[in-house]
Image (spheres, helix red, strand yellow):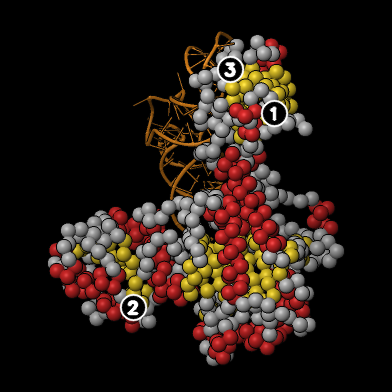
Amino acid sequence: MYKDTNCADLDKNRIGESVTVAGWVSRRRDHGNLIFIDLRDRSGLVQIVFNPKTSKSSHILAEKLRNEWVVQIRGDVVRRLEGAENPELKTGEIEINAIDLKILSTAETPPFEIENEINVDDLTRLQYRFIDLRRPKMQKLLKLRHDVTHEIWNYLSKKDFVQVETPILIKSTPEGARDYVVPSRLHPGKFYALPQSPQQLKQILMVSGIEKYFQIAHCFRDEDLRADRQPEHTQLDLEMSFVHQNDVMDLVEDLFSSIVKKVRPEVKVTDPFLRITYEEAIERFGSDKPDTRFGLELKTISNVVSNLGINVFDNTLKNGGIIRSIVLPGCGEYGRSQTDDLIELSKKSGGKGLVFIGLDHEINSLDELKEDQYRSPLKKFLSPNTVKNICDITEANPGDLVLIAADQSKVVSNVLSSIRSYMGKKLNLYKDNEFNFVWVYDFPLFEWDELESRWIPAHHVFSSPKNEHIKYLEKEPGKIKAELYDLVCNGYELGSGSIRIHDRDIQTRVFNIIGYEKKDINERFGHLLRAFDFGAPPHGGMGLGLDRLIMILGGQDNIRDVIAFPKTQTASDPLFDSPSDIEKEQLDELSIFLDNEE
RNA sequence: GGUCCCGUGGUGUAGCGGCCUAACACGCCUCCCUGUCAAGGAGGAGAUCGGCAGUUCGAAUCUGCUCGGGAUCGCCA
């Protein structure tokens, strides 16, 4: 070994020891006859002193040292001079008197500094990812990631789960996201697809009698990127036989609690996790992935604002729409530019506009509300009594701003939930180190696709309808709730799962509703259905986004920061410069002809 | 495919028609310095302002296109 101790493991208990350390020169302070080096390794920093009285040759060599050179130093751990201690540093009470210095590598000046808080373009960071990852913050996030997966392995192993690796080269199915595709050399003109998730493989493993399976699985989706979406991401994938929905939820809940306890012991996690139905989530938050760290719940006010001569509202209701509102506490005196911001946000979310009612702060009682104590563009239609009724339902108080959206219910949900998220942050309604987990369950099995005029699966085709809803299958598919559940944290969807269909008859009926022909079914799912013919146990499971979980646990707002080598928004890698051209010989082998005209 | 923001020495910013022969901070280089820890002091090098085209007597600055990065809608069963 080039070193017998880590830099930051040294402290006053080790004074007098002779040690050898190795690492990177983090900073040098050259006082002429005395040179200080902050030496950095994975553990942290320690101060090295080069004193000509201790070692003349080392001192001369140390004059050459520059940032990020890699060095090995032998020396004695000594107590620092009185008054020269550095309380900011873990090793601040001691230093190493260097006797020997060996330069292991020189280094160019790095393109940016290796500190926790840097303000550098993402492109530069990714081009020099090896430098970026030297930053203690990034090291901490990679370690956090390790600790999380370690805990997952530990926990699930203790619970009798077996980790099984599934292939990366599998088969394209036209369902779901766009596939990443790999050409086959041995089968000219044919392609493998990279898995969007090991979904069908793990279900086959259930038929194989594995009973409890998990995998930290890479999943690939060729769709556009976002702050929380990479083309290649990692899932904790798990599946269990002979379980009901609650068994899966209980297990995952306990697992996630123990992960948080392990890696963020100072954080309080809701115990038990909140469990709400899909319907309740939409009703209260307008979203199936609500941020439950704060209130600002939505209220329906269709009844109190109809038939007042307000055309927008009456027409909306006539067309089967709904009128809902959200109350922003203390925002009653918002000016034009602030309300315009909210209107713009609502338009971005697909809405047409918003109606405001701003309540004065100096209102003694809403029961004696006067005309001049509230403002609204629709004021001439809104009597004090109507406003009071609205306040009753929405629980608005003096000084609040009531926002009203009228449209089809899906649009209203989108508009008000995006305003809710935006204002929750703006009004500082939650702390950064709060983790609010919530289960959302009882999702509908099907959604109506307006464009194609047909029912499509809300999750995937193997999710089981609730037993008592099987009777609606052919008559009212929209009414069917599924054994489908999502885990949500702080407004992020962390994962979703379901109890799967293991009955051939029900599976066929679901396929029929989606409108699959026999031929399609065989081509796409024949392998799985064939397996089901040989004794399929009842089973269910989940897929959980590991990157997002670590992003939240690490207090980050971008998934790239918890992935060692992520891609840019155009799915390229500035470090490797991928994707890239390949040789003509490679193309020929694959029987691929490029149409370079376009 | 759409919308929005950004692109100026190595890094981050300022400059937003002529005061620009492009400013500032950090970093870098040289020299001085025995107690610093964002060391200090003195001096120095380094950018044709992402690219192309246009407007103009004159463009880092205005316009168009394009490339790259970021945010977001669509998309992500």
Which residue position is annotated with label 1?
Answer: A21
Residue A424 in the image: state x and y as whole percent.
39, 58
Q: CA distance from mark 2 to mark 3?
A: 74 Å
Q: Label 3: state its secondary structure.
A: strand
Q: CA distance from mark 2 to mark 1?
A: 73 Å
Q: Label 1: state its secondary structure.
A: strand
Q: Is A286 or B75 nearer to us in this picture?
A: A286
Crowding near the residue tagged with mark 3, few <14, some 14–19, many ≥20 C-alpha atoms within 10 Å: some
Q: Is residue A67 above or below residue A151?
A: above
**Residue at mark 3: chain:** A
Which residue position is annotated with label 3?
Answer: A30
Can residue A346 be seen from the camera position used here?
A: no
Residue A32 in the image: state x and y as whole percent.
58, 12
Image depth: mark 2 or mark 1 in front = 1
Can residue A36 be seen from the camera position used here?
A: yes
Image depth: mark 3 or mark 1 in front = 1
Q: Is A195 or A472 nearer to us in this picture?
A: A472
Q: Is residue A433 above or below residue A45?
A: below
Quarter of the image with the N terminus of chain A is top right
Q: Label 2: state its secondary structure.
A: helix
Crowding near the residue tagged with mark 1, few <14, some 14–19, many ≥20 C-alpha atoms within 10 Å: many
Instruction: Look at 18% across and 74% down and name the residue there.
Output: A385
**Residue at mark 2: chain:** A
Label 2 and label 3 in one chain: yes
Q: Which mark is residue A183?
A: none
Amino acid type, residue under disc 1 in the picture = Val
If you read the primary sequence from the N terminus, does the residue marked by circle 3 or circle 1 appear first? 1
If you read the primary sequence from the N terminus, does the residue marked by circle 2 or circle 3 appear first? 3
Which residue position is annotated with label 2?
Answer: A316
Amino acid type, residue under disc 3 in the picture = Asp
